[in-house]
Amino acid sequence: MRIAVVGATGMVGRVILQVLEERNFPITEIIPVASQKSVGNTIEYRGEKYTIVSMQDAVELRPDIALFSAGGETSKQWAPKFAEVGTTVIDNSSAWRMEPNIPLIVPEINADILTTEDKIIANPNCSTIQLVMVLNPLHKKYGIKRVVVSTYQSVTGTGKDAVQQLEGEVRGENVAKVYPYQIFKNALPHCDVFDEETGYTKEELKLTREPKKIMRVDEMNITATAVRVPVQGGHSESVNIEFENDFELADVRRLLADQEGVTLQDNPDTNTYPMAFYSEGKDDVFVGRIRRDLSLPNALNCWIVADNLRKGAATNAVQIAEYLVKNELVK
Ligand code: 2RA
């Protein structure tokens, strides 16, 4: 397999390379792609150095799969060019996610819809992926009526400049700000940009829309508030779920414990619950604090945590690529 990693020098791009190596993905050649200023530099993969090439050169090399994490504009411009030469693109940006004919994939949930015709595949938003990994098994059993989610998002979701802002503020330095305010000792109810029509941020709109496409349901009501917090290990989410039908807590816990890619961490007696600091570098989605909502019948609260750079981005994308190869959906 010839694999292009587009955005190879970015935070997600670097984790994609790490995950490809960890999972021993069947690669004959890595084609690292980055902006013009990085062309000619090298990256290391499996102890070998690979020279970063331009987007056009990468297209002409006709990779089998191109894993993109280079922003929406770059993806809109270049993903079709790769597709035209037969490359299957798996894109991490929001550019294609809600396009009707573009599959939006979490492999544990809906990889079965993929065909050889799909040349651009969208990777969902990080906060969406960890949410649907918990919602899906519960929806299949009980039918979900409504979801209320509040997120507590890592600065790594914004990128390396945001990490540098936080680390600089921790050291008491007057650093360049990616966010409109200090993030250290603060919480910003502002992830991505505000939508003028709704007053939601785009991050919140992604959370209300993407799960329904992935889970193939229309009638589920979802609302969200997305908050940036001074954390680096992963995204955390407080989630309230109202079901169509009643449930047994023990059955909910068993369903989640049995779900591939989900780890149950839920025991108040031993202070066992998911935490971003301890999820960093791991691929599972961690769920705990599961308890009935005392204010509403057929409803529960839970706490969901995942490393947004891994299952929230790189690992999910690589798992899609693995599915394509395993099912012979790429040449
Ligand atoms: C964020 N989910 O956390 C967005 C993009 N990675 O900023």
Image: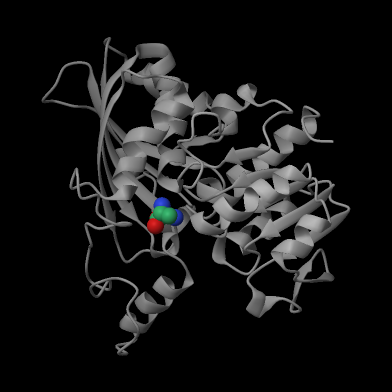
Q: Quadrant of ligand 1?
A: bottom left
Q: Quadrant of the C terminus?
A: top right
Farthest-out residue, left = 295
Q: Position of residue 154 (x, y in %)?
A: 38, 60
Judge from the rendering whether residue 130 lies leftward or rightward of residue 103; answer left or right.
left
Q: Residue at x 37, y 78 (%)?
A: 165
Farthest-out residue, top = 245
Farthest-out residue, right = 28
Closer-to-camera residue (251/36):
36
The answer to which image quadrant residue 297 occupies is: top left
Judge from the rendering whether residue 88 lies leftward or rightward of residue 179; answer left or right.
right
Q: Position of residue 217 (x, y in %)?
A: 40, 19
Closer-to-camera residue (185/165):
165
The answer to whether residue 96 is visible is: yes
Q: Residue at x 56, y 56 (%)?
A: 281
Q: Residue at x 85, y 47 (%)?
A: 1
Colouring chosen for the image of the structure: one colour
The answer to which image quadrant residue 182 occupies is: bottom left
Q: Position of residue 10 (x, y in %)?
A: 58, 67
The answer to whether residue 269 is visible is: no
